[in-house]
Image: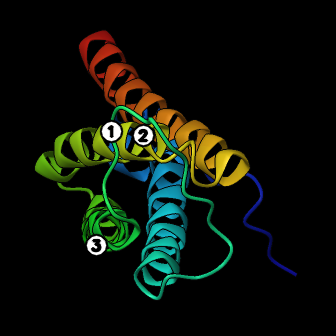
């Protein structure tokens, strides 16, 4: 019986540099973008339909009509979902676009606080985590590329 156990292995001793778009943080950011975008879409649809879930507050500085906020969240949610799908492709422009869109999502949900505070704070945290994950992945990619 012949064995191949002693044959030398032909593999790279030094593998290529780590590739950022395939990193776990980037994939997690894209998944969170898709999740957060879908939640913003549902939030927008509920606000446009004038659901009884939301409470209108008085004397709020950034006061729009509830349907106005609904359209903002609906459009922003669609853009966030599309950006999340683009981040999954690994394109560099999609990472930058994702940072901008997630930042806008965090601002929009911060301004949404008086209407639905708990959900707004959850989506603010998700959007901030998305920005962190997209920026950290890019930083690690540059660091690992310069070490090779």
Q: Which mark is residue 62?
A: 1
- Nearer to me, 61 or 119: 61
Q: Earlier in the sequence, mark 1 or mark 2?
A: 1
Quadrant containing the C terminus in the rendered view: top left
Q: Which image quarter: residue 65?
A: bottom left
Binning the other alpha carbons within 10 Å of mark 1 as few (below 14), some (14 to 19) or many (20 upward) gives few
SS of the residue at dot 2? helix
SS of the residue at dot 1? loop
Q: Give the image location of residue 10, x and y in percent.
A: 47, 50
Residue, x 31% and y 29% (percent of image)?
A: 138
Q: Mark 3 = which residue?
A: 71
Q: Which mark is residue 111?
A: 2
Compared to residue 118, the image places residue 49 above or below, namely: below
Q: Give the image location of residue 45, x and y in percent.
A: 44, 83
Q: Give the image location of residue 20, x and y in percent.
A: 36, 40
Q: Is residue 16 left or right of residue 96?
A: right
Residue, x 37% and y 71% (percent of image)?
A: 70
């Amino acid at each position: 019986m012949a064995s191949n156990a002693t044959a030398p292995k032909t593999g790279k001793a030094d593998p290529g540099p780590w590739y950022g778009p395939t990193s776990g943080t980037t994939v997690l950011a894209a998944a969170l973008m898709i999740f957060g975008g879908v939640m913003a879409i549902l939030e927008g649809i509920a606000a446009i339909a004038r659901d009884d879930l939301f409470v209108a507050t008085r004397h709020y500085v950034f006061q729009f009509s509830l349907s106005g906020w609904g359209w903002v969240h609906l459009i922003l949610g669609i853009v966030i979902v599309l950006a999340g799908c683009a981040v999954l492709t690994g394109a560099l422009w999609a990472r930058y676009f994702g940072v901008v869109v997630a930042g806008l999502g965090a601002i929009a949900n911060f301004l949404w606080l008086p209407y639905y505070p708990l959900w707004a704070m959850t989506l603010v945290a998700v959007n901030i985590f998305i920005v962190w994950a997209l920026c950290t992945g890019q930083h690690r990619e540059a660091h690992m590329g310069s070490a090779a």
